[in-house]
Image (cartoon, rainbow, N blue to C red):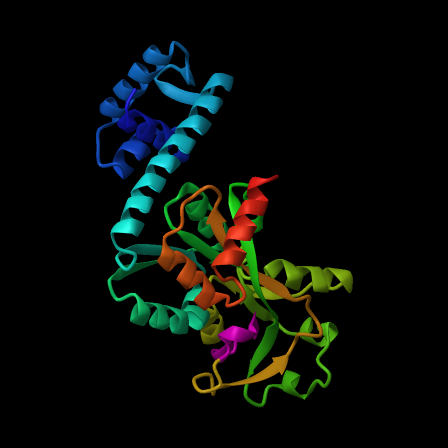
Amino acid sequence: MNLQQLKYLCAVVDHGLNVSDAAEALYTSQPGISKQIRQLEDELGLTVFVRQGKRLASLTPAGAIVVATARRALREIANMKRVADEYRGEDTGTLAVATTHTQARYVLPKVLREFATRYPKVKLVLHQGNPVQVAEQTARGDVDLGIATEALADFPELVTLPCYEWNRVVIVPRRHPLAKAKPLTLEALARYPIVTYDFSFTGRSAINAAFDAKGLTPNVVLTALDADVIKTYVELGMGVGIIARMAYDPARDTAFETLDASHLFAPSTTRLGLRHGVFLRGYVYAFIALFAPRYDRAAVDAALAARGRR
């Protein structure tokens, strides 16, 4: 048994039991991965995968336990490397963060600028995706941290830290009739075509729930993955926009009038996700504190410890 076999095993599972996809991701050959997995099964004296011809169909019950054990082993080996890196020099390394467009565009720039000033030798890598993709990347260990509003709390592998609450604004072209609606109501909104976030994104569930509670069906004519696209189509006159308040920039968004919608929709909570059981470098703690000041090192360790006692 060797480290390469464990990596191949987990990669195959992470790629939906598609050996070709796993081989491509690992820059190796499909026959090479298949051979290593067969050798691992022979050494263990058990079958890890149920096979249908040459295709891997599912994990056996024993295989599921083997994969979980392999993941723990790989995580602890990675932890040893992080410990060594930490004690050789805290100010060097890589920090990979997965997040959504709204966070990357409107919340993180100030945080990343301050972090880069404090840790100039740490390479920053930013991955953007929808909340489920952010959670999956964090759970797999592709990134050190995940930041999103939806999905993170649904992954048991993650410890999630609630960071801040936010709500929404409605944006309309200047002199739009809806701007005269005071106070703004869901009934008034429902009379106009709406441009807002994709169903998987940024608190969309709170928008749906508010209309459902009133027995209203909003006329959503276009959905998008980020606020900048929503603004583009609102400016073109395709509808009124519902976006996160943080995504409205008064200095840049001069084409719009904004209407407060915090009384219409339940607030959403942005969370930061960490994999349980991973050794955190000192600069990871520093980044967390910059993003959410209430989480100093002691608070983060307390949250991780609480998760470990469950």
Left or right side of 26 for 48:
right
Q: Is residue 108 above or below residue 45?
A: below
Q: Is residue 239 visible?
A: no
Q: Is residue 244 above or below residue 48?
A: below
Left or right side of 283 for 179:
right
Task: Based on the picture, tell me whether residue 285 belongs to the magenta stretch.
Answer: no
Q: Residue at x 25, y 51 (%)?
A: 88
Q: Who is closer to the viewer here, 10 or 279?
A: 279
Q: Is residue 282 visible?
A: yes
Quarter-wise, where is residue 45 in the image?
top left
Quarter of the image with the N terminus is top left
Quarter-wise, where is residue 70 in the image?
top left
Q: Is residue 274 above or below residue 59?
A: below
Horizontal and vertical percent for residue 6?
33, 27
Horizontal and vertical percent for residue 303?
56, 51
Q: Is residue 301 above or below residue 309?
A: below
Q: Residue at x 43, y 22 (%)?
A: 66
Q: Who is closer to the viewer here, 15 or 75?
A: 75
Read off the magenta span.
234-248
Horizontal and vertical percent for residue 254?
47, 87
Q: Residue at x 43, y 53 (%)?
A: 145
Residue projecting furthest to the front: 87
Left or right side of 162 for 44:
left
Horizontal and vertical percent for residue 160?
54, 52
Q: Who is closer to the viewer here, 83 or 177?
A: 83
Number of labelled discs? Answer: 0
Residue projecting furthest to the bottom: 175
Q: Who is closer to the viewer here, 106 or 15?
A: 106
